[in-house]
Amino acid sequence: MTSPLFPTGEEGRPKQEQDEGVPTMTHSLTIEPIGETVAVEDDQTILDACLRAGVWLPHACGHGLCGTCKVEVVDGEVDHADASGFALMDFERADGKTLACTARLLSDATIEADLDEDPDARRLAVKDFPCSVIGLEDLTHDIKGVHLRPETGGMDFQAGQYVNLTLPGITGSRAFSLANPPAEADHLVLHVRRVPGGIATGHIHDTLKLGDRVTVTGPYGRFFVRKSASLPMIFLAGGTGLSSPKSMILDLLAEGCAEPMTLIHGVRARRDLYDQACFEDLAARHPNLRYVPVLSEPRPGDEWRGETGFVHEALQRVFPGGFAGHKAYLCGPPPMIEACLRTLMQGRLFERDIYTEKFLTAADAGGGKVRSPVFRRL
Ligand code: FES
């Protein structure tokens, strides 16, 4: 998946400025209702400028397809650029709406955005981090652990957030969740599954080597633990969707969190399961952590005595009395997410207590091109 912010540029900077040395103009953007003003370069999107200034705006696809980032331009002129006609209809354009992820400023401007104040969200500006590859490990037959050291200081982030990774010689960037806890800001870890035919994941699996330089841009995302709630937590992960819950759980345990936590990690077969020893060890040392690996298609010879079936089926068995009074964090492919959402809601846990990366189906996007942000990490 290409970068949601700069699909054709490198390292998150405006392409024109990088490639041609042409000076860029800067416009001033005021964001209401918070009244903050940020600088926006003339080939930079409103969304990128805001995120790099530490101002979070709602967004999902990052490509002008879903409409999540719609804002109202109350003053000034914008170029809607690649906004899809489905995500931004003609009457909305006429009404002064635009999509922050595609719109460029043609003058100083003021926008009105639907900002969601979250007491657990930290204000963290998106930045570019040149990194060296300091470790590569085979986690399974098709998942690699990639260890990176930022060369200009550690990345401040919240457990559960993701980054965009730019690889040398490969156009665009790919998004991956961070699997390390924020306390290890100078040693970033990504879990990368080889996507059949995928250029970037193929490069990571076949070509990337120790000492190579890559660029990480981030942090992104609103998938983080609502620590202020002080409630028992359920983490549901499918495949490499484990990376965010791993970061979250390591972070919570390091802080001495005593709330009960349950991690259910679903994979197909024994050969797809990873970090089992890590979580078994954590669960042995922390009585408030319960770890439940579950295989949906154990293979002959797996000799598996643990849970079998899908994540939502294991979830039902592990919580026969329902889920009321919990917070749930879901990370995995859309079918897993959808099945788990149904199960959680049937068990009396509702939207306000369920957190997941917002994902889109092709039908949602109207253009057939969008894949879930959750997919980007699988
Ligand atoms: S995030 Fe802008 S249209 Fe999807």
Image (cartoon, rainbow, N blue to C red):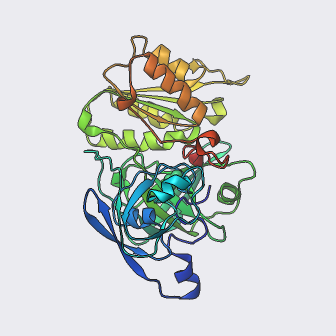
Residue 198 drawn at (x, y percent) = 71, 54
Residue 110 drawn at (x, y percent) = 34, 66
Residue drawn at x 41%, y 55% is: 71
Image quarter of residue 39:
bottom left
Residue 321 visible in the snapshot = yes
- Asked if residue 366 lies left or right of residue 51, the reply is right
Q: From the viewer's perspective, is residue 112 above or below residue 339? A: below
Q: Of 29 and 170, which appears nearest the observer?
A: 29
Q: From the viewer's perspective, is residue 161 above or below residue 297? A: below
Image quarter of residue 347:
top left
In which quadrant will I find the C terminus? top right
Q: Of 29 and 263, which appears nearest the observer?
A: 29
Residue 350 drawn at (x, y percent) = 38, 25
Residue 123 drawn at (x, y percent) = 29, 57
In the displayed orientation, state which residue is furthest to the top.
321
- Asked if residue 339 lies left or right of residue 140, the reply is left
Residue drawn at x 49%, y 65% is: 103
Image quarter of residue 204:
bottom right
Residue drawn at x 56%, y 80% is: 16
Q: From the viewer's perspective, is residue 374 above or below residue 19? A: above
- Asked if residue 342 lies left or right of residue 121, the reply is right
